[in-house]
Amino acid sequence: MPQYWTLVFPLGMYTAGTSELAQVFGLQFLLVISYVMLPVVLAVWLLIVAGLILRRVAQLRVPGRRAAASESWNRPWSEAR
């Protein structure tokens, strides 16, 4: 699940950067991209947070998986998949 966070940052920065560029240079047509992307970025962020919370709750509810759940947070990214 942590690998999905790599989607959120570029989307957010693309949106923020486009908005700033439009404001600095007075390119109003670029604001449309920011207005369209903002709800998309927020939706992706909320989906990833919800998935992370649900996964963590599911891991903690199953007896015997509590140790495995805590170990999965400490593994390197390459092994976490």
Image: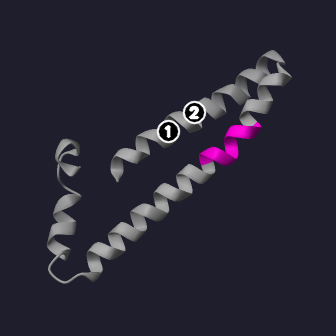
Amino acid carrying mark 2 in the image = Met
Q: Provide residue 53's location: percent of width, then percent of height.
A: 41, 67
Determine the image quadrant of residue 69: bottom left
Return the residue at label 2.
13
**Relative to 49, is 61 on the left or the right?**
left
- Indicate yes or no whether the magenta region holds residue 77: no
Q: Provide residue 71's location: percent of width, then percent of height.
A: 16, 62
Amino acid carrying mark 1 in the image = Phe
Q: Main secondary structure of the magenta part?
A: helix
The relative height of residue 31 versus residue 7 in the rendered view (above or below) is above
Q: Nearer the viewer, residue 80 or 73?
A: 80
Return the residue at label 1.
9
Estimate the spatial distance between the alpha carbons at disc 1 and disc 2, rounded to whole Å: 6 Å
Which residue is found at the position 16% from the left and 47% from the top? Answer: 79
What count of labels does the image hold? 2
The relative height of residue 60 versus residue 42 in the rendered view (above or below) is below
Q: Provide residue 56's location: percent of width, then percent of height.
A: 33, 69
Q: Secondary structure at mark 2?
A: helix
Which residue is found at the position 73% from the left and 31% from the top? Answer: 33
Q: Residues within 10 Å of mark 2 (few under 14, many from 20)?
A: few
Which residue is found at the position 79% from the left and 32% from the top? Answer: 32
Which residue is found at the position 19% from the left and 42% from the top? Answer: 78
Q: Which residues are magenta?
A: 35-41
Q: Provide residue 48's location: percent of width, then percent of height.
A: 47, 55
